[in-house]
Image (cartoon, rainbow, N blue to C red):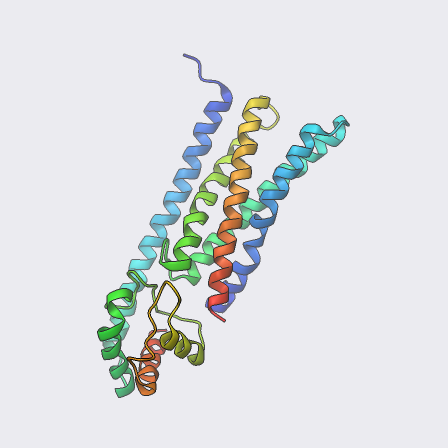
Amino acid sequence: MRIPGAVKAALFAGAIAASMLGGTLAFAEYMQKKSAAQSSLSSTNSPQSPLVAQGQHLFLMNCAHCHGDDARGDEGPDLHGLRKTDARLSALINNGIKGEMPRFNQKLSASDVQALIAFLNSMK
Amino acid sequence: MGKEFWLRVHGGSTHFPIVLLGVSVLFDVLGLWWPDRSARRGLHFAGFGAALIAVGGTFVAVASGLLISNWSTLGTGSLLRHHIFVWPVFGISIALVVWRLLMRERASSRAFGIYLIGMFAASALVLAAGYWGGELALAGQ
C-alpha cells in the first residue's frame, strides 16, 4: 500500500510535535523536582524567626491540605515565589477566592494572617 | 534574570501566537479566494510567515511561562485552565507548521483544508489560553 506524501509529512510532523511536547513536559517535571529538592534543603538549613515558625504552624493547620505540606501545591497552587504584596496576600487569605479558596477572616486573627504572610514570604 | 524579567518576556511573547495564528488563517483563507494569482501566492506566503513567527513566539512563551510558574505543567485553578489550552496549542501548532514546511505548495486542496481547520482550532485554543492567562495576571494585582 502506497502512503500519500501529505500523510507521510503529517506523520513526521506529528512525531516531531509529540517529541517536542513530551520533551518539554518531561524537562519541566525534572526541573520541578530538582527545584523542590533544593528548596527543601535550603529551608531545613536556614533558621526561622518566631513569626515565620508561627506562620508555618498555621499553614500546616489551615492551608496544607489544599496547598500541600511543603506548599508546593496540591489541590491549591504552589505558594513558593509568590509575587503579591502583603496587602494582596492578606486580602486573599481573609476574603478567599470565590469558588476556589475559602475565606479565613472568621478563623484567623490579624496577627495570624501576618504570621502566615511572613511564612509565605520566607519561601521565595 | 529573575521572575520579573521572565514575566515580562511571557507577557510579550504570548501575544505573537495569540494574534498571528488567527492572522495566518485569515491570510490563507483570503489566498484561496483572491482573484489575482500573484496576490494569492503573496497571501499564502504571508500566512505561512505569520504561522512560523507564531510558533517561534510559542516556544518563547512556553519557556518563560514554565520559568515563572516554577516549572508547573498543570497547576490548579486558573493556571490549570490556562495549561489545558496551552499544551494542545503548543503541539498542534508545531505539527501543522512542520507539515507545511515539508509540503510547501505540493499539498492537495483537501490536505490544505485540513491544515486550515487545524490552524483555526489552534487559534481558537490560544485565545482561550490567553483568556485564562489574563485571569492569572489580574489575580496578581
Q: Nearer the viewer, residue B107 or A37?
A: B107
Tally the marks. Answer: 0
Q: Residue at x 48, y 18 (%)?
A: A4
Which quarter of the picture shows residue A19? Answer: top left
Report if residue B2 is visible in the image: no
Q: Is residue B47 above or below residue A32?
A: above
Picture coordinates of residue A18 (x, y %)?
40, 38
Picture coordinates of residue B130 (x, y %)?
52, 54
Q: Residue at x 44, y 13 (%)?
A: A2
Report if residue B96 is visible in the image: yes
Picture coordinates of residue A21 (x, y %)?
40, 44
Which quarter of the picture shows residue B29? Answer: top right
Q: Is residue A62 left or right of residue A86?
A: left
Q: Residue at x 42, y 57 (%)?
A: B66
Q: Is residue B19 left or right of residue A87?
A: right
Which quarter of the picture shows residue B67? Answer: bottom left
Q: Residue furthest right?
A: B36
Q: Is residue B79 above or below residue B19?
A: below
Q: Residue furthest front?
A: A106
Q: Is residue B119 above or below residue A121?
A: above
Picture coordinates of residue B83 (x, y %)?
42, 52
